[in-house]
Image: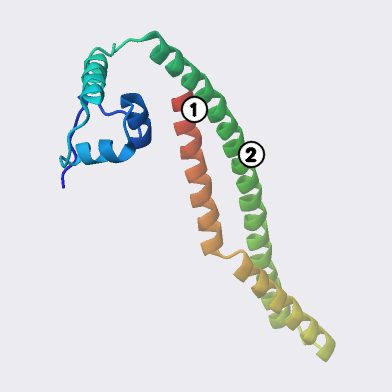
Amino acid sequence: MKKRSVFNKKLLITYDEMAMLLQTTRTQWSMFQIRQRSLPDKSMDRLVALVILSNSISVDSSSKKEEVLKQEATKKKLLEVDLKEVLYKQKKFERKLNQSKEKYEASMNTLDFVEVVQTQKENDYFEAGALGIIKTNAIRTLKTHSLLKLTQLEIKLASLQLEKELIEKAIE
């Protein structure tokens, strides 16, 4: 069953609230909405009065303007808080990215060092073992701070920059 549209404008009024306004039961109002029953005469008179009042709603009512101003002020405050959070995250990811780049470069340099040392002179067992451990640690660090991780951090940083710009635009 299709609900009957009573008001021209969409209103957020529950069945219970409308029943209280019309001084009828929720069931009677519900059945009226799905066209299975009519309302009592007094309730119908009240409904007609409410419909007439709803049609005369002013576009520029003072309460509406006041509420919009309150919401604008709240929006600005909350967006400024969001902007601070984004700036903090941005700095945090910049630090992480710089640290990861440094560790990536250091690992690459370490691998080059190990290769040069292994090819330049005869190594005894201790040095070969130590070089193996150093190489393993460098490879482990490379996996932790891989090109994929660096790219992911750069993408995250770029998205935070875009978010920052959008928030700043919304604040204006």
Visible in this render: residue 84?
yes
Q: Residue 41 in the image: state x and y as whole percent.
A: 20, 24
Q: Residue at x 31, y 25 (%)?
A: 22
Residue bearing mark 2: 88
Q: Residue 76 in the image: state x and y as whole percent.
A: 52, 23
Q: First in sequence, mark 1 or 2: give its number.
A: 2
- Left or right: residue 156 versus residue 133 is left
Three-letter residue code for mark 2: Tyr
Q: How many marks?
A: 2
Residue bearing mark 1: 168
Question: In terms of secondary structure, where does tag 2 sit?
Answer: helix
As displayed, is residue 34 above or below residue 83? below
Three-letter residue code for mark 1: Glu
Q: Residue at x 64, y 57 (%)?
A: 100
Question: In terms of secondary structure, where does tag 1 sit?
Answer: helix
Q: Quadrant of residue 20?
A: top left
As displayed, is residue 58 above or below residue 37? above
Visible in this render: residue 12?
no
Local crowd size for mark 1, using a 10 Å CA cut-off: few (<14), some (14–19), many (≥20) = some
Q: Residue 117 in the image: state x and y as whole percent.
A: 73, 77
